[in-house]
Image (tube, rainbow, N blue to C red):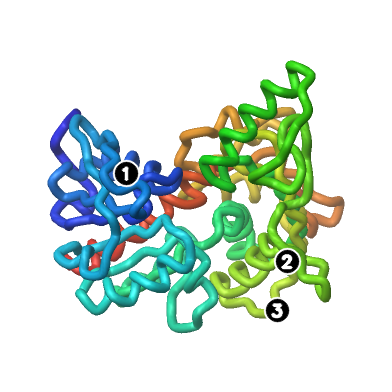
């Protein structure tokens, strides 16, 4: 593997916290792909994962237990942990001079902490904040589809139906999908553990808790609140319905966007063709699936359809929630923070 590194992280010491998890592993893979050398990377995890040896480029990393003071000497830490761990360790890291990119929900709605999708509001990183929140995966994928048309035509409302992969719930959920699929094919009873109902050969509303007053589950509430914060549009009308589907990896979304000004199909295709982070398939009959997009850094936009008056745009999107929906977005934030610090 080549030793050259074009990333702004080349001369930074990078910690990946939660290195054993799916997002942490993906962050390490992306850093490796960008050529960040082994000696510049530190891996941290829980007491349970401490001592685990994981591959990195042509070498190996040993996961160290995250303890107070453990991040000292690092320049940037990418957290792929739960919110409680982030709340306990991110402030300590900041005090030690370590910039933190947090992938949990701990700081997303904190008014003091920027919530960033670099292609949408990356200018918030230009002041070099010490703590940056990484949005929910579904929010990231949604806004990469909404933002190009919002800038050109304005947006009144967004209706989103999500089709979320099992891996969004972690490694144990993926193992459950595999084991239940085998059991179902063998005619055995399915006993759910990671989810409230069987996930094999099944779809169901997202498993997060439901607010009895609004009827929204936590995932739907996150999309609404985070989209409004990122777009600096507190009254934006966003109506999501989040669904879990028996797909290992990559989330899909069906979107209907009400525009403030009429658009044409040609203009919409041109917008997506020039916007960073997305790829447009303008073939009306294109069948873009999660299997096609797995491992891709781009969010696929397809099936653009407009109402007769040009004010209602419907789209089908697919994006890898472990990459752009989580780890890649965090690495991109880290790269921009590093560039600001060096510049």
According to the picture, the residue beneath numbered tag 3 turns out to be 235
Q: Which structural element holds mark 3?
A: loop
Q: Which structural element holds mark 1?
A: helix
The residue lying furthest to the right in this view is: 308
**N-term mark: 1 or 2:** 1
Judge by depth and name the residue closer to the eye, 42 or 235. 42
Does 32 sit left or right of 197 as displayed?
left
Task: Give the quarter of the image for residue 181.
Answer: top right
Picture coordinates of residue 163, whole percent (x, y): 70, 44
- The answer to whether 227 is drawn above or below residue 292 in the figure is below
According to the picture, the residue beneath numbered tag 2 turns out to be 238
The residue lying furthest to the top in this view is: 186
Picture coordinates of residue 311, whole percent (x, y): 79, 59
Distance, label 2 to label 3, CA atoms, is 9 Å
Q: Residue at x 37, y 64 (%)?
A: 101
- Which numbered circle lies on residue 28? 1
Judge by depth and name the residue closer to the eye, 55 or 137. 55
Residues at badges 1 and 2 in contact (C-beta under 8 Å)?
A: no
Evaluate whether residue 24 shows in this view: yes
Q: Which structural element holds mark 2?
A: strand
């Amino acid at each position: 593997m080549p030793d050259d590194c074009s990333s702004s992280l080349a001369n930074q010491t990078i910690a990946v916290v939660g290195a054993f998890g799916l997002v942490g592993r993906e962050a390490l893979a992306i850093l490796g792909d960008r050529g960040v050398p082994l000696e510049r990377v530190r891996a941290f995890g829980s007491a349970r994962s401490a001592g685990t040896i994981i591959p990195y480029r042509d070498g190996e990393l040993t996961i160290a237990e995250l303890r107070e003071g453990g991040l000292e000497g690092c320049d940037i830490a990418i957290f792929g942990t739960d919110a409680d761990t982030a709340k306990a360790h991110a402030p300590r890291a900041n005090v030690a001079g370590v910039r933190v990119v947090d992938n949990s929900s701990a700081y997303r709605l904190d008014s003091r902490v920027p919530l960033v999708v670099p292609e949408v509001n990356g200018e918030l990183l230009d002041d070099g904040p010490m703590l940056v929140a990484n949005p929910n995966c579904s929010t990231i994928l949604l806004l990469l589809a909404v933002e190009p048309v919002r800038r050109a035509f304005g947006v009144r409302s967004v209706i989103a139906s999500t089709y979320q992969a099992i891996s969004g719930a972690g490694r144990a959920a993926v193992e459950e999908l595999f084991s239940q699929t085998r059991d179902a094919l063998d005619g055995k009873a399915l006993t759910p553990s990671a989810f409230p109902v069987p996930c094999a050969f099944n779809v169901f509303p997202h498993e997060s808790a439901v607010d009895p007053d609004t009827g929204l589950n936590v995932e739907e509430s996150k999309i609404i609140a985070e989209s409004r914060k990122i777009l600096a549009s507190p009254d934006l009308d966003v109506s999501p319905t989040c669904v879990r589907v028996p797909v290992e990896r990559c989330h899909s979304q069906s979107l209907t966007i009400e525009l403030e000004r009429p658009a044409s199909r040609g203009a919409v295709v041109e917008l997506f063709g020039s916007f960073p982070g997305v790829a447009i398939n303008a073939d009306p009959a294109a069948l873009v699936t999660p299997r096609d997009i797995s491992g891709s850094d781009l969010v696929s936009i397809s099936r653009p359809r407009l109402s007769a008056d040009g004010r209602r745009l419907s789209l089908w999107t697919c994006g890898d929630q472990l990459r752009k929906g989580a780890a890649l977005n965090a690495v991109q934030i880290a790269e921009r923070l590093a560039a600001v610090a060096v510049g």
